[in-house]
Amino acid sequence: SNLYLGNDFNACYRVELVERNIRSLLNCSFPQSPSPFSDEPANFTVRAIELYDTDDADIRQYFDLVYEFIGKNSLISIVVNASYARLY
């Protein structure tokens, strides 16, 4: 399995998703951008987590949920959409 990291553009760019055989999308951002594929459950599995991009955001509460989602979709690739990148 592969894990592809991208932004809103990558998560909505159907051509690239199909070319890379990406069938599962995990959106970890807030505010959420609606997925253009939510109405295509036969083609894409979409999971959204409202994750605030702040220094004090407790992301540990989502570890089990994300681990389970990735595990169920281990034979296909996943795009993780994060709202911002932080450099320290």
Image: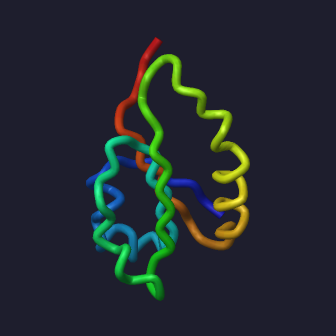
The residue lying furthest to the bottom in this view is: 42
In this rendering, the answer to whether 59 lies above or below 48 is above
In this orientation, which residue lies closer to the viewer: 64 or 12? 64
In this orientation, which residue lies closer to the viewer: 44 or 31? 31
> Which residue is drawn at the image coordinates 39% and 69% (left, top)?
17
> Picture coordinates of residue 9 (x, y %)?
26, 54
In the picture, measured across the screen, residue 68 lies left or right of residue 57, that is right
> Picture coordinates of residue 79 (x, y %)?
47, 57
In this orientation, which residue lies closer to the viewer: 43 or 20? 43
> Picture coordinates of residue 63 (x, y %)?
68, 43
Q: In which quarter of the image is residue 34?
A: bottom left
In the picture, measured across the screen, residue 75 lies left or right of residue 11, that is right
Question: Quarter holding the N terminus?
Answer: bottom right
In the picture, measured across the screen, residue 64 lies left or right of residue 48, that is right
Label total for image: 0
Q: Indicate the colouring scheme.
A: rainbow
> Which residue is drawn at the image coordinates 40% and 43% (left, top)?
29
> Picture coordinates of residue 33 (x, y %)?
29, 54
> Which residue is drawn at the image coordinates 48% and 51% (left, top)?
80
> Which residue is drawn at the image coordinates 45% and 70% (left, top)?
20
In this rendering, the answer to whether 72 lies above or below 7 is below
